[in-house]
Image (tube, grey):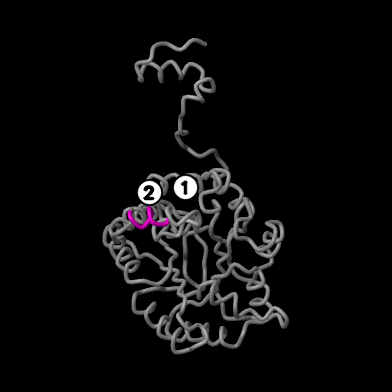
Amino acid sequence: MMPGFPRTVVGGVSLPRLICGTNWMLGFSHTSKAKDQLIKDLFDTPAKMADVMEVFARAGCNAVMSPLSEFMAQAIREVEQRAGVEILWVCTPSYAEWGNPDSWKESVDFAKSLGAQFCFPHQIVTDLLIDRAHQRLDPLLVDHLRYVREVGMIPGLSTHAPEAITCSDACDADVASYIQPYNAAGFLCQVETDWLQRIFGKAKKPVMTIKPLAAGKLHPVTGLTFVWQTIRDCDLVTIGTMSAYEAEEVIEISLACLEGREPDLDLQFTRSKKVLVGEQAEAVDRANGSGSHTK
């Protein structure tokens, strides 16, 4: 039996509170075009993506968030076969013509056909259709959410605008959750993090936070500790990694945060840290064949 990870309920579905993100496997580094290309070169097959996603799945984190693509669907199916567990897909489609219902209905139908359980229109769609002046969602976005529900998926909003939460709640929109950037650096956050904490705390539905490490700009322990300690028990964290090793590490850090203990990790070591480890430095020197270390 697979180990468990703390879970919450979104739209009536049990989800792990830690979701496998995919930017670091699909080529969205938020760093440079060169870094984007490196990622794409490293993850050029669904099987390579599945190697990372499988680590999450076997730890009880059987959920993934990503854009809509057959490539992604293939990776999900492979993980399900390897781990023997259903992967819950939070799909965030965007549309060639967001103002054309035929365009987004086609994408929603495609998401359903690929097996997505959740369909949250991407920020590029959502944030254009928030009626801040009247504290509501544009009728076109309301129609979109209604259609997602009609085809049998769970609707929500992927957004960078905190107003998406307040406006959705004010008009009682049919959303199960909201995706929002949230990290200690304030990276891609449209207001200060204390404001986001207040908004999340009052939200009527669970919040799926993204970018907890600010696209690699924060140390994992630093970034994850901040997010886990400042969200509610019903909220979730989405994090992407570039390797199975990183996946194991962020899972352990997350569990440690939730359990109130120190993470069980081997720290990375460099020569400049010899003075910090005392007698351990002697063993390092012997292993490296560099002689004894003088205290």
Q: Distance from label 1 to label 2 (Cα)?
A: 11 Å
Kindly identify which residue carries mark 1: 250
As drawn, 67 above or below 293: below
**Mark 1 surroundings within 10 Å by alpha-carbon count, few (fewer than 14), some (14 through 19), many (20 or more):** many
The residue shown at (73%, 81%) is 133
Residue type at mark 2 is Ser
**Is residue 39 magenta-colored?**
yes
Q: Position of residue 190 (x, y in %)?
A: 66, 63
Q: Secondary structure at mark 1?
A: helix
Q: Which mark is residue 243?
A: 2
The residue shown at (47%, 64%) is 15
Q: Main secondary structure of the magenta part?
A: helix
Between 178 and 94, the residue placed more toward the observer is 94
Q: Secondary structure at mark 2?
A: loop
Q: Nearer the viewer, mark 1 or mark 2?
A: 2
**Image: magenta residue range:** 36-41
Q: Position of residue 236 (x, y in %)?
A: 54, 60
**Is residue 252 magenta-colored?**
no
Horizontal side of residue 12 vs 37, given as left or right: right
Q: Position of residue 126 (x, y in %)?
A: 56, 76
As drawn, 93 above or below 263: below
The residue shown at (51%, 77%) is 155
**Mark 2 surroundings within 10 Å by alpha-carbon count, few (fewer than 14), some (14 through 19), many (20 or more):** some
